[in-house]
Amino acid sequence: MVKKIARRQINLLYHDAPGKTVFVAGDFNDWQPIRKLEDKNGDGVYRCRLLLVPGEYQYKFLVDDQWRSDPLNPDFIPNDFGSLNSVLTVKSK
């Protein structure tokens, strides 16, 4: 019998001026900026939910075509491009 690994819901936030286009990409989606963060209230708080299995993930935000690490996350690691990737640790229950 194969044990199914439960995914955890992760909420990501990004704060900026209203009207930005914000995506998240990371090693959880092969660095493809296809997951858009929404600013539903028009207040510059962009949100999205991810379902991830427990583990450690590197990610960045793509804001108006510019890569940015997560300013709300103090965990980061240098990448091969001379900048920093944010690190997200998803714990099992």
Image: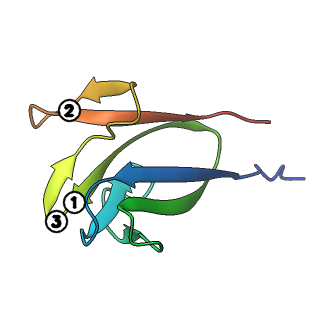
Mark whose residue sits in front, 3 or 2: 3
Badge 2 element: loop
Which class describes the residues within 10 Å of circle 1: few (<14), some (14-19), or many (20+)? some
> Residue, x 39% and y 72% (percent of image)?
42
In space, the residues marked 3 and 2 are separated at their CA atoms by 21 Å
Badge 1 element: strand
Instruction: From the viewer's perspective, tell me whether residue 24 is left or right of residue 21.
Output: right
Name the residue type under label 3: Asp
Q: Which mark is residue 64?
A: 3
> Residue, x 41% and y 61% (percent of image)?
46
**Residue 56 percent coordinates (x, y):** 51, 34
The residue identified by callout 1 is: 63
The residue identified by callout 2 is: 79
Name the residue type under label 2: Asn
**Residue 93 percent coordinates (x, y):** 80, 36
Name the residue type under label 1: Val
Q: Are marks 1 and 3 in contact (CB under 8 Å)?
A: yes
